[in-house]
Amino acid sequence: MRDAASKSSQSGAFSLLFGYLSRDRRLLARALLLLLLATAADVSGPLLAKHFIDGYLLPGDWAWQPLLLLLAAYLVTQLASAWLRYRQTLSFTDIALGAVLDIRRRVFHHVLRLPIRWFDHAATGQLVSRITNDTEAVKDLYVQFLSTVLTNAVLLLGILAAMALLDLRLMLIALLLIPGVIGVIFLYQRLSGAAVAETRQQRSEINSRISESIAGMAVIQAGNQQARFSAEFEQLNQRYYTARVRTIKISGLLLRPAIDLLSVVVLAAIIAGFGLAQTQGAVEIGVLYAFLNYLGRFTEPLAEITQRFNLYQQAMVAGARIEALLQEAGESTGGTLPTLTQGAIALRALQFGYQPDKPVLGPLTLEIPAGSFQAIVGHTGSGKSTLLNLLLNFYQPQRGELLLDGEPLSAYSREALRSGIGLIPQEPFIIAGTLRDNIDMGRGLSAQRIADAAHQAGLDALLERLPQGLETQLGERGTRLSSGQRQQLVIARALAGSPRILLLDEATANIDSETEAVIQRALRALHGNITLIVVAHRLSTIREADRILVLSQGEVIEQGNHRQLMALPRGQYRRLYLLQQQAQRVEMASH
Ligand code: ATP
Ligand code: MG
């Protein structure tokens, strides 16, 4: 089963990597033509030399005209070969960079469309490594492997042809080198495949560890965890080192030395063969000169070819990993309904668990009228964010139905859901850019729309204080926002899309009063206009809700408005509310 999967991703990798060759045939044809011409120019050198030795040097014939011609031809071919090689390298690099550009684009495009549930199991660093390092390995395949192997294979053929022109028997002896080299390559591939795959895996784990540590630096330092992280990283680093040393040992042992040995054997055979031929008085000195010259070059391309095979190996592993990522099923394209008109929600016996055998929500049955203000409260882990995830279609319920305006969620197009439902998530996500960028989020909204949203979210006071207003840069070197202002910004972003339904996931009960006031003001302004679903930890935020749902282990255990729930003598909500009030009083007294 796994074998079949890895086979298919292997062949997928193959077509992924080599597919780019046939994409731009003109470019490829040019590269190949340059390659042929460069090789011809290259190989002609010793032939000209042989002509000089046997035709002029040995007979002592110093006719200057043909000699000058010979010298000129020699110079021209050598210069031409250098220039053509340069052009040829450029052409192959062009193909290579084009391939990397396209693969990287495809991978990132694909990742952006993977379903949210996929990211539950994805390590960020590994993903980054696939998009950068693995695609870079593809470039090596073209520039280093393909170009080198083709160049050297053609050079080899050229040399063989030239050798055959000189002396067929000696050429046949040189030919013996080839099966030996192929044997070495084969052995190398057998031995190094696993080790190469392992180094890649280790490297992406190192990447992922570093990026996770950077993201969590505050937590690491606050928890005084530096030593533990250092130690774990050290282990990982050491494993990479060991794996890498192993691959180098294999290639150091097999590739260069084995081939050098083979070529010495063949050299001896040729000299012996030459001696034999000489006793029969057939071979000229110029032939021997040219032959030795060719033989010296003969092993070079063979060694190059075999050495580049580890790049091929790496590119194949990288290609298989990229291909596996591209094979991940993307988010479904959704239905056809273009817009959400009202914003009414109905849940019918809805059931869901992140793992099918571990239910988190439900069965839930609820009617939420359009324009109403619904609050969800409950202990941590009771399923509040999960319910919002289902409404956003990030996950699909295992059982039951989720209807929007009477139609199942799946009937709506992705755009209808994204523009119809606004989300203010538990952790506000601020991008590096201006305030305007953060509200617009690439949707290309009108200036009026953005200004209105900023106003609705209560950002006016902040904007007045900033000299550059909406164009103020945030993030890395820009203005830092307080948590209340961040919240306002995220509210503005959600409202700018004019959603019919607004989902708000309040982070903790410990939000500061400024942030709470911001949220309350926004909710009051929106109440009655759009459907509000607010997950609240601080219960004072939702006192004005039309209905409060108390969740416990994925089920609604109480519902009603604030007054009704407070009237339940043993109610969960009443208990929580009184507790929070008490805590607040203690806090105020202690200040
Ligand atoms: P909080 O108040 O802390 O935000 P919550 O009510 O929003 O809690 P959920 O995030 O909905 O809780 O989580 C409900 C349950 O589902 C928890 O047991 C949690 O561990 C689990 N859970 C949440 N997200 C995932 C996920 N991506 N994969 C697997 N289990 C998850
Ligand atoms: Mg939550």
Image: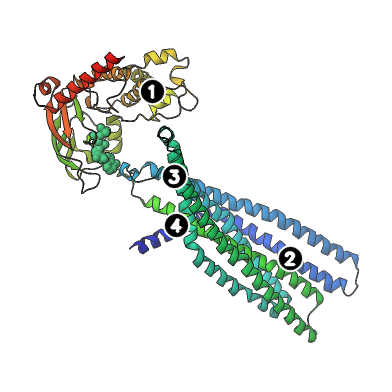
The structure residue drawn at horizontal position 18% and vertical position 22%, both measured from the top left corner, is: 577
Quadrant (top left/top right/bottom left/bottom right) for the N terminus: bottom left
Badge 3 vs badge 2, beta-carbon distance below 8 Å: no
Q: Which mark is residue 446?
A: 1
What colouring method underlies this structural image?
rainbow
Amino acid beneath label 2: Ser
Q: Which residue is mark 3?
A: 208
Q: Of circles 3 and 1, which is in front?
A: 3
Using residue 116 as the reference point, say whether residue 304 is left or right of it: right
Amino acid beneath label 1: Ser
Number of disc labels:
4
Whole-Å distance between the Cαs marked 4 and 1?
44 Å
The structure residue drawn at horizontal position 32% and vertical position 24%, both measured from the top left corner, is: 491
457 or 548, which is in the foreground?
A: 548
Mark 1 and mark 2 lie on one chain; the one further toward the N terminus is 2
Mark 3 and mark 1 lie on one chain; the one further toward the N terminus is 3
Q: Which mark is residue 13?
A: 4
Specify whether tag 2 is near ligand 1 (CB below 8 Å): no
Badge 4 vs badge 3, beta-carbon distance below 8 Å: no
Quarter of the figure with residue 532: top left
Quadrant (top left/top right/bottom left/bottom right) for the C terminus: top left
Q: Residues within 10 Å of mark 3 (few under 14, many from 20)?
A: some
Whole-Å distance between the Cαs marked 1 and 2?
68 Å
Q: Which residue is mark 2?
A: 44
Q: Of circles 4 and 3, which is in front?
A: 3
The structure residue drawn at horizontal position 43% and vertical position 42%, both measured from the top left corner, is: 228
Amino acid beneath label 3: Ser
